[in-house]
Every structure is written in structure tokens, then in C-alpha cells.
Amino acid sequence: MKRRQYLVQINRDPGSDWGASVPDLPGCVATGKTLDTTLRRIERAIEIHVRGLREDGSPIPEPSHRTITPRRRSRAIDFYATIEVAA
């Protein structure tokens, strides 16, 4: 099984929890009260998502290589990270 690095969008609006989503894996999301918790949860969510695709006989999407331009929103946090998983 090879390892893949998926791009993860991380965001947080004032007064809310952290959120994470994976653009290459639609529907793969996680939330948490702290950034560390959210990153651990999205890593696990990616692993579960990929396992489900494999069990269904669906292809595992290759991570896209893209250029990211962070958006500036007042008082909101929005950035990207990569998560590496066995897939």
C-alpha cells in the first residue's frame, strides 16, 4: 500500500470549532475544539474514507497538485495543510 498526501482545508470562524475538509475526497470532513484534535480526526476520517472506497471497489483518488491562494476573511482563520495516509 502506498502513501498519499492529501490537501486538507482547515478553517475556524469566530465562536465556532475548527473544521477540516479534503477537496479530493468529497464528504470527508472533521471538526474539533482544538486544531490538534481536528487534525487527528481528519487523518482518521481520510483513512476510513479510503478504506470504504477500497471495500466498495471504487478507485482511490490521487491527490491533486494545486496552487492555493488563501482567502482573507475578517476574524476568520482559513489555511491548508497536508495529511499523509496509507492508501
Image: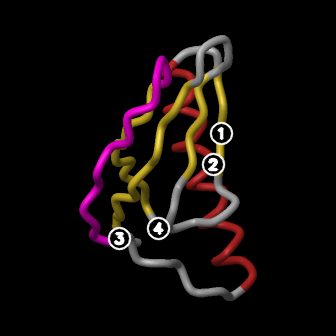
Q: Residue at x 57, y 66 (%)?
A: 25
Q: Residues within 10 Å of mark 1 (few under 14, many from 20)?
A: many
- Residue indicated by mark 2: 45
Residue 68 on the magenta span: yes
Q: Amino acid at mark 1?
A: Ala
Task: Name the residue type under label 2.
Answer: Ala
Residue hosting label 3: 2
User: Are the residues at dot 4 and dot 3 in contact (C-beta closer than 8 Å)?
Assistant: yes
The residue range painted magenta reads 64-76
Q: Nearer the viewer, mark 1 or mark 2?
A: 1
Q: Is residue 56 above or below residue 69?
A: below
Q: Residue furthest top?
A: 15
Q: Earlier in the sequence, mark 2 or mark 4?
A: 2
- Mark 1–mark 2 CB contact (< 8 Å): yes
Which x, y percent locates residue 30? 65, 39
Q: Is residue 65 left or right of residue 18?
A: left
Question: What residue did someone put label 4 on?
Answer: 87
Q: Which residue is at the front of the view, 2 or 40?
A: 40
